[in-house]
Image (spheres, helix red, strand yellow):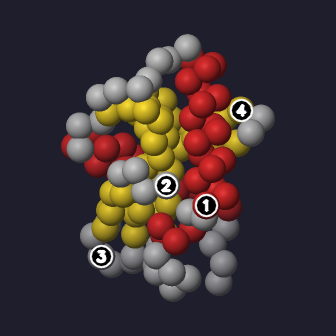
Amino acid sequence: MAASYAQRKALGDFGERLAVGELERQGLEVLDRNWRCGQGEIDIVARHGGALVVCEVKTRSSDRYGAPVAAITRRKADRLHRLGFAWAKAHQVAYQQLRVDIVAVLLAPGTSPVLTYYPGLA
């Protein structure tokens, strides 16, 4: 049976909260969450040294349709870069580098969450 919108939203929100904790453990400073503009949405914006980091969080309840990170295509990565430039401009934030990181979260029923952090993957 397909999950409802509310179930998918709750799963995604939980995955994002876990991702924030992981990014902070990795030494990133979270600046913003769920920022939207006409071009799309950024799950998490963070700073890591001189880098501005746009972080996409992919949360899945199983790997039945492949690993969560497989959902990040070149087209999606390019859009995330554009969104990062738009965020920096809107917030007047200077940076030395802009990179896209990914946090894949697998929340399979009956198991502990599995987080995999991919810095600079896209």
Q: Which mark is residue 37?
A: 4
Q: Quadrant of the N terminus?
A: bottom right
Nearest to the observer: residue 33 or residue 51 = 51
Secondary element at tag 3: loop
**Image height of 82 relative to 121, above or below:** above
Q: Position of residue 31 (x, y in %)?
A: 43, 27
Of the two numbered discs 1 and 3 in the rendering, the one whose residue sits closer to the viewer: 1
Spatial separation of the CA atoms under disc 4 and disc 3: 36 Å
Q: Position of residue 78 (x, y in %)?
A: 63, 50
Spatial separation of the CA atoms under disc 4 and disc 1: 20 Å
Q: Which mark is residue 108?
A: none
Q: Relative to residue 71, is residue 108 drawn left or right?
A: left
- For marks 3 and 2, the one nearer the N-term is 3
Spatial separation of the CA atoms under disc 3 and disc 2: 28 Å
Spatial separation of the CA atoms under disc 1 and disc 3: 31 Å
Q: Are marks 1 and 3 in contact (CB under 8 Å)?
A: no
